[in-house]
Amino acid sequence: MTTKLLTGLLAKPGESATDVRCTRGERMFQIAFGAVQWPWLLRSLYGGTQAQKAALLARLGLEADALPHLGSWKADTYLLHRIVDEIETAQPANVVELGSGATSLVIAQALAQNGGGRLHSYDGHAPFVAAMDDWLAEHDLAAAFHHAPLVQRDVRWPGLWYALTEVPGSIDLLVIDGPPWAVHPFARGMAERLFPLIAPGGTVLLDDAARPGERYVAQRWKKAWPDFTFSYEGAGTKGLLVGRRRL
């Protein structure tokens, strides 16, 4: 959940106060885990160089101010370039992303340039979801944006998960950039709920994969999902886990 302007250091009130009802034990774990992973959290605030950003915008044919600011929890340029790589190569029909924002604009533009697939984007902060249509419309783009409050639980994972609606029956590319780590460091592990919908040959991209929480998630996924191959890419500032479903 990020905007096209500067993004604050804390989660939006709609996610942290209204939707998320963590247990006391989960809250204590978050505090303790935050003390361990703060170096990775600081790295998450870096969005890439101006040259990398300019190259991305030129690649997509977007104007120089289309992405006014990267960093402060937004996707970094490495993730955005890798998303474009996947769309150019696979030309997916259905892309699902968890956590709307800069990725939404990049995905929608890349899809428009490569086969015209559909983006289905989910975020827990309702006012921000409402503003995303306007942001994309500024560039003559559109996507299916959905408010997905963080209200669901899973016995296999701590924290809370999105209440997802209107999910396509087949997903060619899944981009996971939410929920925020403050919900729970392991909460993104619940994205595996969508893995049965990934089409053969489809791809999963997990952002912030260098963080200890996401590394734990990756270890569990590798054991639980043998029909996927997972590889870690550390060239960006935040790390990227790439999962591909076997044909």
Image (cartoon, rainbow, N blue to C red):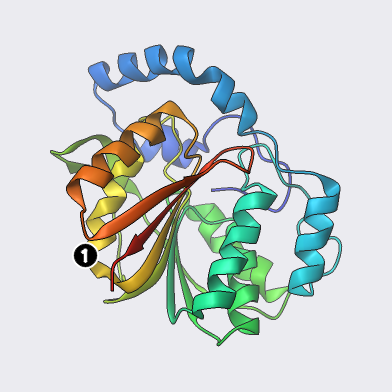
Residue drawn at the location 80% of the way across and 44% of the way down: 49
| Residue 98 placement (x, y as % from top left) | 43, 55
| Residue 5 placement (x, y as % from top left) | 73, 48
Reading the image, the residue beneath label 1 is 196
| Residue 134 placement (x, y as % from top left) | 65, 69
**Quarter of the picture holding the C terminus:** bottom left
Foreground: 43 or 98? 43
Q: Residue furthest bottom?
A: 115
Residue drawn at the location 61% of the way across and 48% of the way down: 75
Above or below, 1 against 203 in this view is above
The quarter holding residue 153 reads top left
Above or below, 143 against 78 in this view is below
Q: Left of 66 or right of it: where is 74?
A: left
Q: Residue furthest left?
A: 155
Residue 13 seen in this snapshot: yes
Foreground: 26 or 78? 78
Q: Left of 23 or right of it: where is 177?
A: right
| Residue 179 placement (x, y as % from top left) | 42, 43
The quarter holding residue 46 reads top right
Residue drawn at the location 26% of the way across and 52% of the way down: 192
Foreground: 70 or 131? 70
- Per the image, label 1 sits on a secondary structure element best described as helix
Q: Left of 214 or right of it: where is 135?
A: right
Above or below, 221 against 111 in this view is above
